Image: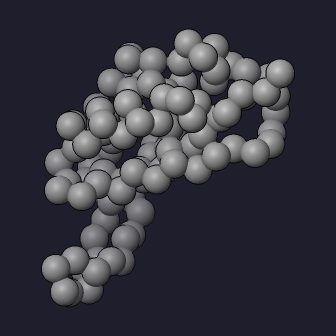
Amino acid sequence: MTHNANWVYMTAASKEEAAMIGGKLVEEKLAACINIFDNITSVFMWEGKIEQDTEVAFIAKTTADKVPDLVDMVKSLHSYDVPCIISLPVSNGNFDFIEWIAESVGR
């Protein structure tokens, strides 16, 4: 039996914001685990100008059916007007780990 695991890639303005959002996602069983990558450099176009800023990237491990609620929660907690929230399907990997993700979020 396989599960529809997803990685959800996100960015935040600070490590504290990423940890707060990640903690809430795990608490609400919308994610099994959050990985936080501090101090990344982002270059992007915003309101017609090229911008460069330091951000924090974080990845939520979840199942496909949890993604819509996860996106809604992140948007409600996030400081950005248009936060980066991108879901990527996991097509293969350690079945035991993928099973743990499903069990952690309540399938």
Q: Is residue 35 above or below residue 28?
A: below
Q: Is residue 36 above or below residue 39?
A: above
Q: From this view, report whether residue 44 is shown above or below residue 17.
A: below
Instruction: Answer with left or right where residue 20 lies relative to residue 103.
Output: left
- Furthest residue in direction bottom, as rendered: 49
Task: Indicate whether 32 appears above or below 15.
Answer: above
Please state which of residues 10 and 42 is positioned toward the viewer in this rendering. Answer: 10
User: What residue sits 79% from the left and 27% below the top?
Assistant: 2
Tell me the colour scheme of the image: one colour
Numbered disc total: 0
Q: In the rendering, at what x and y percent does residue 31 appear? A: 49, 27
Q: Residue 81, percent across and down?
A: 17, 56
Q: Residue at the location (80% across, 39% down)?
A: 93
Q: Is residue 38 visible?
A: no
Across and down, in percent, residue 59 comes to 50, 44
State the residue in front, 86 or 96.
86
Residue 87 pos. (x, y %): 51, 48
Camera sees residue 10: yes
Q: Quadrant of the N terminus?
A: top right
**Quarter of the C terminus within the rendering:** top right
Q: Is 98 displayed left or right of 87 in the figure?
A: right
Horizontal side of 86 relative to 97 (left or right) equals: left
Give the image quarter of residue 82.
bottom left
- The reply, left or right, for residue 2 in relation to residue 102 is right
Question: For the point 58% across and 50% down, which residue is it?
Answer: 88
